[in-house]
Image: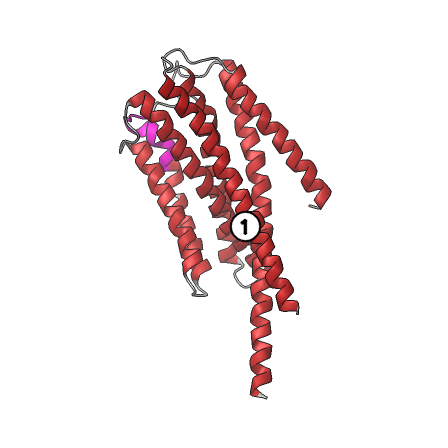
Amino acid sequence: MDTVRSLQHLHAAYILTWCVQLGYVLYLVRSFVQVKREAQELKK
Amino acid sequence: MNRAAFTVSAIVVAILLSYGLHQALDVAPTEATMGNIQRIFYYHVASFTVAFAMFGINLLASLIYLVQRNTDSGAAADALAVSAAELGVIFCSIGLMLGMLWAKPVWGIWWTWDPRLTSTFVLWLIYVSYLMLRRLSDSGQAPTLAAALAIFGFADVPIVYMSIRWWRTQHPQPVIFGEKGSGLDPAMMMAMLVNIGAFMCYGILVLWVRYKLERARQQLHEAQALHSLELARAEAR
């Protein structure tokens, strides 16, 4: 019962999962950099 | 965890996730009636398993926070609670979106208000409210209120889990711990377990990073508050 549409949904599901997860990891990295910068500014 | 241990853990998690992907897309057999779209199952179940585990961690950390509110371990528990809630929402959102992508070709609709889907959506809303309370409230009471919300919020987790056992739903009946005759092909079971394990390891690693970030934020806010106090004192002199 595979159709082009169902295979598109399957691929979209796997791609979407990792786009969301990678996006979140990038958000964490950016937040870490921001906190570090603010801490350094406070020390000055 | 030092930098070397973190790097090794990240590499191990990446290998596990790649193996899980290989199991889900190449090794597991194609389901007879639904075809390849059923392969969404491996990520769908793994995402919700990690989401429930994160909400469980959030509950335990919230309880610890309520008991040890004014101590450093209380602050650490609060950091863990907010980190786990955020990750739980991420995994729950992914699980819901994967469910919709699976439902459309199989049921012909993206969404239906059946007990499993509705209770899961309510769970998602509860933890999104938890995060909004944490982010938007300036009150010093926000962590305490959020901890109380977390305790009530977790009550929905067993309802979500049991919903397909208690009520007749559009969502499929349980294949694990289900009725007689239910179950999974051993190769499908293997793919599911590998993905749950890989997602769990990934979730714990990211939780650790998120927790470290929250602790760094707490320390920064403390230092900023002390700095402001010193400035105010200097001005008063």
Residue B177 picture quarter: top left
Q: Residue furthest top?
A: B32
Residue B203 picture quarter: top right
User: Compared with residue B180, is residue B7 higher up or lower down, i.e. above or below?
Assistant: below
At horizontal 27% and vertical 31% (from top left) the residue drawn is B112
> Badge 1 local density, few (<14 within 10 Å), some, or many (20+)?
many
User: Compared with residue B138, is residue B33 higher up or lower down, i.e. above or below?
Assistant: above
Where is residue B224? Give x, y as percent. Answer: 57, 68
Q: Where does label 1 land, which residue?
A: B80
Q: Quadrant of the C terminus of chain B?
A: bottom right
User: Compared with residue A4, is residue B73 higher up or lower down, i.e. above or below?
Assistant: below
At horizontal 60% and vertical 40% (from top left) the residue drawn is B205
At horizontal 29% and vertical 31% (from top left) the residue drawn is B111
Q: Chain of mark 1?
A: B
Where is residue B118? Give x, y as percent. Answer: 30, 36
Q: Is residue B231 visible?
A: yes
